[in-house]
């Protein structure tokens, strides 16, 4: 049984410069999608990032102070190894050096 993506329900129209469309087409080709799929995936990713950046967390004073104390302490070897692993996933261009090293 094959699963199909739901059919799009609305149109989103954009106007772009020729060189911008060419750049988008090149990037879409590199990841194996068409222009529409690439632009939708990119726009959704950015929209989620913007919304996540605007998230607000609430904590009482005691919990807030515990978080601040934790953030002010040096990373444990396990935490540093985890941060290095995350950076390997998101930052592949040397000579990047993490701030905690």
Image: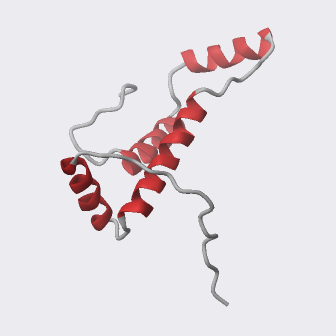
Identify the residue at the far bottom of this view.
1
Residue 93, position in %: x, y?
24, 45
Instruction: Tell which of 49 and 18 is nearer to you.
Output: 18
Residue 74, position in %: x, y?
50, 22
Relative to 57, is 5 on the left or the right? left
What residue is shown at x 44% (from left), y 63% (from top)?
37
Scheme of colours in the image: secondary structure
The image shows residue 64, relative to residue 32, as above or below, that is above
What residue is shown at x 63% (from left), y 61% (from top)?
9
All told, the count of numbered labels is 0
Residue 22, position in %: x, y?
21, 56
Instruction: Tell which of 65 and 54 is nearer to you.
Output: 54
The image shows residue 53, relative to residue 85, as above or below, that is above
Q: Is the N terminus in the top left, top right, bottom left or bottom right quadrant?
A: bottom right
What residue is shown at x 32% (from left), y 62% (from top)?
28
Instruction: Tell which of 97 and 48 is nearer to you.
Output: 48
Q: Is the C terminus in the top left, top right, bottom left or bottom right quadrant?
A: top left
The image shows residue 9, relative to residue 43, as above or below, that is below
Relative to 69, is 46 on the left or the right? left
Instruction: Tell which of 52 and 89 is nearer to you.
Output: 52
Relative to 94, is 57 on the left or the right? right
Find residue 94 and report its image quarter: top left
Relative to 64, is 83 on the left or the right? left
Residue 41, position in %: x, y?
47, 55
Identify the residue at the far left of this view.
19
What residue is shown at x 41% (from left), y 54% (from top)?
39
């Amino acid at each position: 049984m094959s699963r199909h993506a739901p059919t799009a329900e609305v149109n989103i129209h954009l106007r772009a410069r020729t060189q911008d469309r060419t750049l988008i087409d090149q990037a879409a080709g590199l990841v194996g999608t068409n222009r529409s799929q690439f632009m939708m995936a990119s726009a959704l990713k950015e929209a989620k990032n913007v919304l996540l950046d605007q998230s607000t967390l609430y904590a009482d004073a005691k919990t807030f102070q515990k978080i601040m104390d934790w953030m002010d302490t040096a990373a444990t070897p396990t935490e540093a190894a985890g941060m290095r692993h995350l950076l390997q996933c998101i930052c592949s261009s040397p000579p990047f050096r993490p701030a905690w090293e």
